[in-house]
Amino acid sequence: MDFLRQTLVIARKDLRAELRTKEAINAALAFSIVILVLFSFAFDPGEQETVEMSGGLLWIVFAFAGTLVLNRSFAREVPNDCLDALVAAPISGAALFLGKALANFVLVIAVELVSLPVFGIFYNVHWTGQIWSLLLVLALGTWGLTVIGTIFSALTVNIRLRELMAPLLVYPMLIPALMSAMKLTMDLIAGKPLGGEDEVWLRLLVAFDVIFTALSLVLLETVLVG
């Protein structure tokens, strides 16, 4: 119970801090919408080629927009020595990581859910045909993005060029998750239900989430304290 309570306290603290300023979420939301609108001029809406590549385009936008949120995860704790206070507090590293990851997940998924209707309108893509399967893939892919982004936010928090270094470290690690999410999203948007060959990609995405969540829970204290 203590672990759950500590996790929820950290998540609630981070959500309140972000919603008070709205710096990261506004930047991520503006970025995703602007990029989706700009890219729509480069493709013919409703064309088969656009539908086939739309899943990949969507996850590229989500990955870049999500980084704007995730980079702030531990950086917001630096002023006034708040990070040192968190490390010294009687709270486990696993609870600290999970709390921050949950808060980041809520923020990133909110940006994605707002972006999806914009995507459907400007690309003339009927993405609601497999809505529940799509939301499942969205949640799994976003959790993978969140886990990797949160742990590398902790790793680069004391680096002067952390805004540059974090994406350089995050994106190569995300390749398996992004490939899986892109493939599944493209098939679902095209009207294909989950199953067959897609089961392999779904299992890869789930395995990615489980493995890197477990590693991050174990390694956070080492990353922050050394």
Image (tube, grey):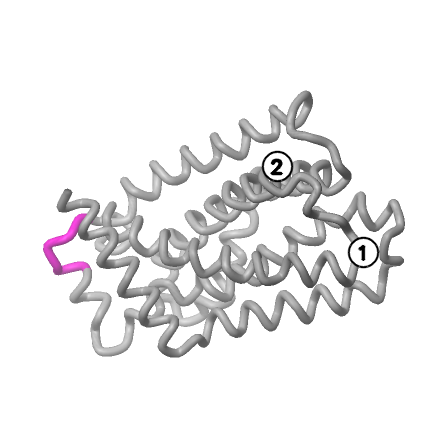
Specify whether 85 is left or right of 98: left
Region in magenta = 87-92
Q: Position of residue 181 (x, y in %)?
A: 61, 41
- Front in this rendered view, residue 170 or 202: 202
- Front in this rendered view, residue 21 or 56: 21
Q: Secondary structure at mark 2?
A: helix
Which quadrant of the view contains residue 33? bottom right
Specify whether 74 is left or right of 62: left
Q: Position of residue 211 (x, y in %)?
A: 41, 33
> Which residue carries the number 2 mark?
180
Q: Is residue 176 above or below residue 117?
A: above
The span from disc 2 to disc 1 (Cα, nearest Å) is 23 Å
Residue at 41% x, 34% y: name it: 210
Residue at 30% x, 48% y: name it: 98
Residue at 71% x, 59% y: name it: 119
Q: Position of residue 226 (x, y in %)?
A: 23, 52
Q: How would you rate the neighbour count of disc 1 (Cα within 10 Å): few for under 14, some for 14-19, many for 20 or more?
A: some
Dot 1 amino acid type = Asn
Which quadrant of the view contains residue 78? bottom left
> Which residue carries the number 1 mark?
124
Residue at 73% x, 42% y: name it: 189
Predominant SS along the magenta part = loop
Q: Secondary structure at mark 1?
A: loop
